[in-house]
Amino acid sequence: MIEMFWPTPVLRDESPWTADELAALRDFAVERFAHHKAHPQEHGLPEVDTRLRLQHNLFHPQHEELAPEVWGQFKSWVNDLYRGYLREAHGVRNANDLQIQARCIPVLNQPGRRAQPHYHHTCDHVLCLYLDCGHGRSPPSERDWAVGDGELILQDPRPMAGFPFWEKVRYIETRPGLVVLHPSRVWHETNPFNAQGTRVLLVVTLRVASHNYCELYTELGSPGRPAPQLDSQLKPRPALNSAERP
């Protein structure tokens, strides 16, 4: 008997947003992407390259104050959808009680661009809401699958040595209004965007910040500071001589 102990739960569904609401979210994502690219933030890490400087979070107040009216509904929808996913996919009975942190990133692709194979290492799950997939796309049945046209590709996370990689992937046809939610550990990429226009989506990375021992951790100290002295009871004791041994 073969039992699937740990399947990989992937949510794929239509979002509730109207065409006008998707357009408002799209315009906001495009404007914020362009603004941040023109005014990249400085980070405290040494020799940070351009790619990291372009990362930001649209859930921060300085972005939300410029967001369209639908933004608050979008944020609540992400919250409810993720908690429902945790209940149904992972059996988390107290999903409504969890503290959840999130980061929202606008992603824009011009024709010929693609997302390289990657996973997200600072979170538990990833949600993608597609806002614009361009125009003039050829039907899936007419595409060369060696090239494709902006499909999301998910890689089976289970190790199977020697198994053909093309039989370990799932292709998801993207379209405006589609939402996909999957574990962050899943390697994923996209085929090149070969249509006309711009491919736009919002990516929300999510992590559970409670009930996972986070509160037990503490800072080790800042780089460059001397290491703290060990507490007296943690210092090694001198060896006993033969007269002192019991």
Image: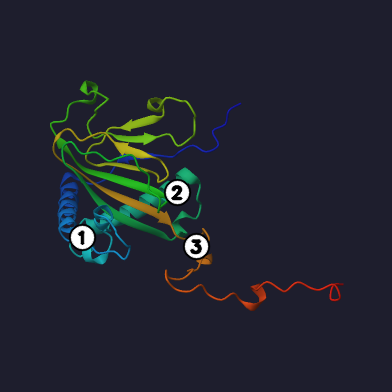
Pointer 1 with pointer 2, Cβ within 8 A: no
Q: Which mark is residue 86?
A: 2
Q: Which mark is residue 148?
A: none
Count residues near mark 3 (Cα–Cα under 10 Å), then give few for <14, some for 14-19, many for 20+. Answer: few
Question: Which is closer to the viewer, label 3 or label 2?
Answer: 3
Given the image, on which type of amino acid does mark 3 rest?
A: Cys
Count residues near mark 2 (Cα–Cα under 10 Å), then give few for <14, some for 14-19, many for 20+. Answer: some
State the separation of the CA atoms marked 3 and 2.
19 Å
Q: Nearer the viewer, residue 229 or 144?
A: 229
- Specify the quadrant that holds the C terminus: bottom right
Locate residue 14 relative to residue 167 in the image: left or right.
Answer: left
Q: Is residue 230 above or below residue 133?
A: below
Count residues near mark 1 (Cα–Cα under 10 Å), then give few for <14, some for 14-19, many for 20+. Answer: some
Given the image, on which type of amino acid does mark 1 rest?
A: Pro
Secondary element at tag 1: loop
Q: Residue furthest top?
A: 142
Tell me what residue is drawn at x 30 percent, y 40 percent: 116
Pointer 1 with pointer 3, Cβ within 8 A: no
x and y, in percent, of residue 122 in the image: 40, 54
Q: Earlier in the sequence, mark 3 or mark 2?
A: 2
Q: Which mark is residue 214?
A: 3
Q: Is residue 223 above or below residue 169?
A: below
Q: Earlier in the sequence, mark 1 or mark 2?
A: 1
Locate residue 235 relative to residue 108 in the image: left or right.
Answer: right
Locate residue 170 relative to residue 213 in the image: left or right.
Answer: left
Question: Which is closer to the viewer, label 1 or label 3?
Answer: 1
**Disc 1 target residue:** 40
Tell me what residue is drawn at x 19 percent, y 58 percent: 36
Given the image, on which type of amino acid does mark 2 rest?
A: Leu
Question: Which is closer to the viewer, label 1 or label 2?
Answer: 1
